[in-house]
Image: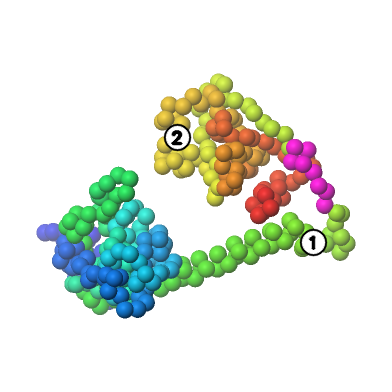
């Protein structure tokens, strides 16, 4: 905020140069509402698009699908194209969408409409930390729900309509670029998976530097090209504690379990296994979902005693073997 001699002006630090003056400031209830009509499938006369919570992607504002609301068995909220949908159940999942069509949605989804602000600008408000923090002041522990009586009393700033349009246009452009890049990344991942499968099934073979064929592949048991490592942390050395994620491999346990590690839980780390560089590790209880990792250049950490840890011999390249672990065959 910029300061005058008398008061703090409600002016953003980053602004398009053609706009001047202060932004307005009101409770959310004064600039938006969550009132919506109700839809009863028992009175349905035909197909209607219905969005459930599972159709809202977390944190991206993307729609994953819809069903026929006339075939559902419960009362739904009615929305119009351009309205803002926000999942009130487990609000920390950040499920929001600007409706691309008229339809109905789960009663666990708020239908928000701008009043003193445009729906386009409201869409970006619901993504702010201020809105999400208010929504997370929810009731219930196992199935928390956002409380509108809390959210509607939140104070939000907003500019004139022309400035709202300029801001939303700019942010939408960035959002579209993110969406385009995400599609490219997804396509590359799919290509990577396809090539990996073909390469390890030897449907695709490379030539050597002279244009000739490489030797035929050998078949060996894993036990013939690896050996277990089982060194315990008997001296209770204060080493970083890691877990294995089926997505990211080796990760600090504090990241895997919401900021907690085994020291916080009072576990005996003398039973933990020491893992050094170039080591593979997996949890036998979760190997079926791909929870196996490669330490690579990670230097001296500890993992639960449940993990099986092993290294490979010089017969096989670790990077090659790590790619093999990601195949459908494995």
Does the segment drawn in magenta span residue 81?
Answer: no
Relative placement, left or right, of 264 versus 45 is right
Instruction: Looking at the image, tell me whether mark 1 or mark 2 is earlier in sequence order.
Output: 1
Residue 236, x across and y down, in percent: 52, 23
Residue that appears at 79% across and 61% down? 205
Numbered label attached to residue 261: 2
Q: Which residues are drawn in magenta?
A: 217-225
User: How crowded is the residue under tag 2: few (<14 C-alpha within 10 Å), some, or many (20+)?
Assistant: some
Residue that appears at 52% across and 68% down? 183
Where residue 159 sits, quadrant-wise, is bottom left
Tag count in the figure? 2
Asked whether the residues under the numbered discs 1 and 2 touch, taking CB atoms below 8 Å apart as contact, a structural biologist would say: no
Q: Looking at the image, is 93 positioned above or below residue 171?
A: above
Residue 170, x across and y down, in percent: 36, 73
Residue 178, x across and y down, in percent: 46, 67
Residue 12 versus residue 129: which sits nearer the camera?
129
Label 1: which residue? 205
């Amino acid at each position: 905020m910029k300061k005058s001699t008398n008061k703090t002006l409600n002016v953003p630090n980053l602004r398009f140069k053609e706009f001047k003056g202060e932004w307005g400031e009101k409770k959310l209830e004064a600039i938006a509402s969550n009132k919506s009509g109700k839809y009863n499938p028992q009175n349905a006369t035909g197909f209607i698009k219905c969005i459930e919570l599972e159709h809202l992607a977390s944190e991206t504002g993307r729609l994953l699908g819809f069903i026929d609301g006339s075939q559902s068995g419960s009362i739904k909220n009615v929305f119009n194209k351009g309205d803002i949908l926000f999942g009130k159940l487990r609000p920390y999942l950040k499920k929001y969408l600007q409706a691309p069509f008229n339809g109905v949605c789960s009663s666990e989804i708020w239908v928000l409409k701008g009043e003193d602000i445009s729906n386009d600008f409201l869409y970006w408000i619901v993504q702010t930390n201020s809105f999400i923090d208010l929504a997370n002041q929810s009731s219930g522990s196992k199935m928390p729900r956002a409380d509108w009586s809390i959210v509607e009393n939140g104070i939000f700033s907003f500019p004139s309509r022309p400035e709202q349009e300029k801001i939303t246009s700019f942010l939408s452009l960035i959002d579209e670029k993110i969406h385009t890049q995400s599609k490219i990344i997804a396509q590359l991942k799919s290509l990577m998976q396809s090539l990996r499968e073909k390469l390890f099934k030897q449907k695709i073979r490379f030539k050597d530097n002279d244009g000739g064929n490489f030797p035929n592949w050998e078949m060996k048991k894993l036990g013939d090209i690896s050996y277990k490592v089982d060194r315990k942390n008997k001296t209770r050395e204060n080493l970083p504690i890691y877990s294995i994620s089926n997505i990211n491999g080796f990760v600090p346990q504090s990241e895997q379990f919401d900021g907690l590690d085994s020291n916080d839980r009072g576990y005996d780390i003398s039973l933990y296994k020491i893992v050094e560089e170039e080591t593979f590790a997996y949890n036998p209880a979760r190997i079926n979902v791909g929870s196996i990792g490669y330490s690579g250049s990670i230097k001296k950490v500890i993992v639960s005693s449940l993990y099986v840890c092993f290294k490979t011999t010089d017969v096989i390249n670790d990077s090659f073997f790590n790619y093999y672990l990601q195949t459908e065959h494995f």
